[in-house]
Image (spheres, helix red, strand yellow):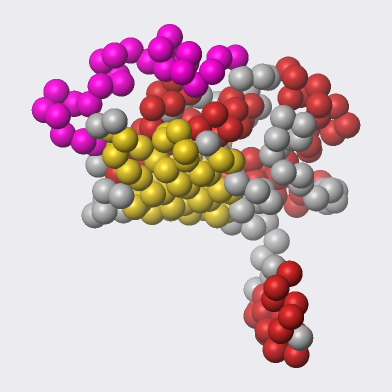
């Protein structure tokens, strides 16, 4: 997902030693970090090349059969962990039609590499539409562990694999909150945190201590955060 984009960005940054301009807020006039790295000054053409081909409603009606969209015959709801697993499976298979009905209309999807979250199912699907046309199918999410005790909140640890082998700088963790909408359990919030390519170690503690001291001396600075 967006997390895989940030992993690719970290990997390319480390191996090429090129600097990257600050990322802009995701919108039709901006691009993902990965597209910036690959497309460069032609990133606007990239956006036009891969528009969302159909609306979320059209995708659901044309590619998502009634049997797939309906709850199980027993009437039981899928567990939260089952919904999240299906979400990862849909992204790995690059099949958005299996993902559409797992996302609530008002879902908020936050990847901390971006300055702003993706708000609403349409915005989230538009990002994934561009994502699946950019990343090779050889790069896949592999779930390491997933919580299953709570049906409304699910935590996941994962890594990426390239043709079945671990990919560099690819460990991550995600959190999902779910709710029941129209008889189905859907994702209403997601957050991705990815392993950084640069690992500051003890320097991170020094930086935190320095910022804490600065705020103690000038508490008004906290209002700018």
Q: Residue at x 59, y 56 (%)?
A: 195
Horizontal side, residue 157 vs residue 196: left or right:
left
- Compared to 34, does 74 lie above or below? above
Q: Position of residue 130 (x, y in %)?
A: 64, 27
Magenta highlight on residue 58: yes
Q: Is residue 191 above or below residue 89?
A: below
Q: Is residue 138 visible?
A: no
Image coordinates for residue 128, horizontal then vertical, percent: 57, 30
Q: Quadrant of the N terminus?
A: top right
94, above or below 24, in the image: above
Q: Where is residue 155? Give x, y as percent.
A: 38, 54
Q: Position of residue 153 (x, y in %)?
A: 34, 52
> Residue at left 47%, top 38%?
106
Please indicate, yes or no, whether residue 98 appears anywhere in the rendered image. Answer: yes
Q: In this image, 91 relative to 26: left or right?
A: left
In this figure, what is the number of numbered marks? 0
Left or right for 135, reference 192: right
Residue 50 in the magenta stretch? The answer is: no
Q: Nearer the viewer, residue 85 or 159?
A: 85
Identify the residue at the far left of this view: 74
The structure residue drawn at horizontal position 74% and vertical position 80%, both measured from the top left corner, is: 220
Q: Give the magenta part as a residue range.
A: 53-78
Placement of the C terminus among the 4 image quadrants? bottom right
Residue pictured at 61% horizontal, 19% vertical: 52
Viewer-side residue, 139 vs 34 = 34
């Amino acid at each position: 997902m967006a997390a895989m984009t940030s992993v690719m960005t970290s990997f390319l940054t480390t191996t090429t030693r090129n600097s990257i301009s600050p990322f802009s807020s995701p919108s039709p006039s901006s691009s993902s970090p990965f597209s910036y790295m690959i497309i460069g000054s032609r990133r606007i053409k990239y956006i036009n090349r891969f528009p969302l081909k159909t609306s979320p409603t059209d995708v659901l009606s044309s590619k998502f059969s009634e049997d797939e969209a309906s709850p199980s015959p027993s009437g039981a709801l899928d567990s939260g962990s089952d919904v999240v697993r299906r979400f990862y499976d849909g992204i790995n298979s690059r099949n958005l039609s299996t993902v559409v009905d797992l996302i609530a209309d008002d879902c908020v999807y936050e990847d901390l590499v971006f300055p702003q979250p993706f708000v609403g199912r349409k915005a989230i699907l538009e990002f994934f539409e561009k994502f699946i046309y950019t990343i090779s199918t050889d790069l896949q999410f592999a779930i390491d562990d997933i919580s299953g005790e709570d049906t409304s909140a699910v935590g996941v640890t994962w890594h990426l694999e390239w043709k079945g082998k671990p990919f560099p700088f690819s460990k991550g963790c995600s959190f999902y909150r779910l709710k029941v909408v129209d008889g189905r359990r859907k994702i209403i919030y997601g957050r991705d945190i990815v392993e950084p390519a640069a690992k500051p170690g003890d320097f991170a503690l020094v930086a935190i201590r320095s910022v804490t001291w600065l705020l103690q001396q000038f508490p008004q600075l906290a209002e700018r955060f």
